[in-house]
Image: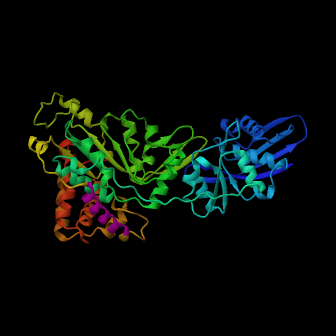
Amino acid sequence: MLSKIESYGLNGLQGFGVQVEVDVSGGLPAYDTVGLPDAAVRESRERVRAAIRNSGFTYPMQRVTINLAPADLKKEGSIYDLPIAIGILTAMGQVPAQEAAGYVFLGELALDGGVRGIAGILPMLISAGEAGARQAMLPAENAGEASFIAGVKTVAIDSLGQAVRILRGEEPAKACERAPWQSAAPHPGMDFADIKGQQGAKRAAEVAAAGGHNLLLVGTPGSGKTMLARRIPSILPTLSFEEALEITKIHSIVGAVKGANTIATERPFRAPHHTASTVSLVGGGSKALPGEVSLAHYGVLFLDELPEFPKEAIEALRQPLEDGTVTITRASSRATYPADFMLIAAMNPCPCGNFGSRLSRCRCAPAQINRYRGKISGPMLDRVDLHVEMSEVGYGDIVSKSTGESSTVIRARVNAARELQRRRYANEGILFNAQLSGKQIRRFCRIDAQGEALLKRAFDALKLSARAYDRIMKVSRTIADLEGSEFILAQHISEAVQYRSLDQKYWGGGSGGK
């Protein structure tokens, strides 16, 4: 007795079809699983046997052989419990084979026959739909997440018994209803109006948000670096449904999509502690899972106390910052994840934090300061578009009753600038200025003669690298977009160059490394 049931596996963000072949034959009772299963798949034997019996069905007292095809791809996790159980019941004639053939099955079984939620349901179903699947049966816990997938009828079940009743025609197969999606409003407790003073830093944050640029904040303790960084999500452009789907796919893989959090409604803000390892930042581990750079895709990765992070972890960010993707290679797997994020980093000017302070005296020796700043390499600095120094807030700013612009007002300007970029790059495969390639910079970043002369003087004076030149051009394009200007003018270049001045002050010259 043989049955074939369709299921899916996951390699990075891409799902791949898995055919669960079940053969029930004569002989002594036995249970074998082949097809490169991991430990969790092999352990399904006990879960499947108990679930079938506790659901009131007959488990075969014969030899059961499970083959997960294709046999050359590793199968991981408990997602194959449900298709294996359905395959056994189909082979035994307890489930109509024709009805089971119309579904893709995904789900983990409990010993009592219940069906538990699984991670990665969204990318698997998207891949299944692209491959031609039209129906899927999955855990009720994943219903909200799966309901946003167009083209695939998703049937959510609570138990193995319910799945069998649907396949037998004893219960209707109700498709998951798609809930309306809407981007969430900025968090009301995080508003730029709360920030006293720091007009220059707030302007830099607006420019960074408008063009998707990376931002480094340098300042003494208490100058408001963290406060500013944590309010940047409140001025980021409105999230689109396509972006929300891409974000949710990544978070689904790590099991972060549960309960009411079915699909992203706001851009991610990730703030790992400075003790984070390289693997936790860029991804990896035995299963090549995405790291913080991918979980921050289309959002913000905030690294507070940047020099306190391990140097190798900081340097590992260089490739994702440049390419917008990260590829994780292991002996048994290779996965590529998107990592198009805004890096917002904050650091003190020296180990004690008081270098350049008007209020406290710096106690650090020059060698200590150089060693501290040396943790941030030239090539890493080159990949950060805006460098901003934040000084202590004065007493007058603290007690002032006047408030600055609200996040709502700033966000409106950011949205307008992003809309300009969206229309401009509609046929270029990019969304915002930070993604411009060298060739695209020459096409879309046109400068007047005065601006060209100013940029040449800055390039020679600051000893800028070719990459730093590109960064200035991208930032200038964003500043022009915020003003609604088609051309990049001298004042736009001047402001963009100011955001590279800390190269000279803190690192003693241009960051010319590659």
Asked which colour scheme the image uses, the reply is rainbow
Residue 423 appears in the picture as rendered = yes
* Residue extending furthest toward the right: 26
**Residue 311, how many percent across, how many down?**
36, 36
Image side of residue 507 versus residue 301, left or right: left
Magenta stretch, main secondary structure class: helix
In terms of image quadrants, where is residue 407?
bottom left
Range shown magenta: 407-422
**Residue 408, how many percent across, how many down?**
27, 57
Total residue callouts: 0
**Residue 80, how many percent across, how many down?**
69, 45
Question: Residue at horizontal 48%, vertical 42%?
Answer: 283
In terms of image quadrants, where is residue 505?
top left
Question: Residue at horizontal 52%, vertical 52%?
Answer: 249
Image side of residue 122 versus residue 40, left or right: left
Residue 133 appears in the picture as rendered = no
- Foreground residue among 479 and 99: 99
Residue 412: in magenta span: yes
- Foreground residue among 455 and 90: 90
- Foreground residue among 202 and 148: 148
As displayed, is residue 380 above or below residue 43? below
Residue 45: in magenta span: no
**Residue 223, how many percent across, how many down?**
19, 40
In terms of image quadrants, where is residue 432?
bottom left
As displayed, is residue 238 above or below residue 26? below
Question: Residue at horizontal 89%, vertical 34%?
Answer: 28
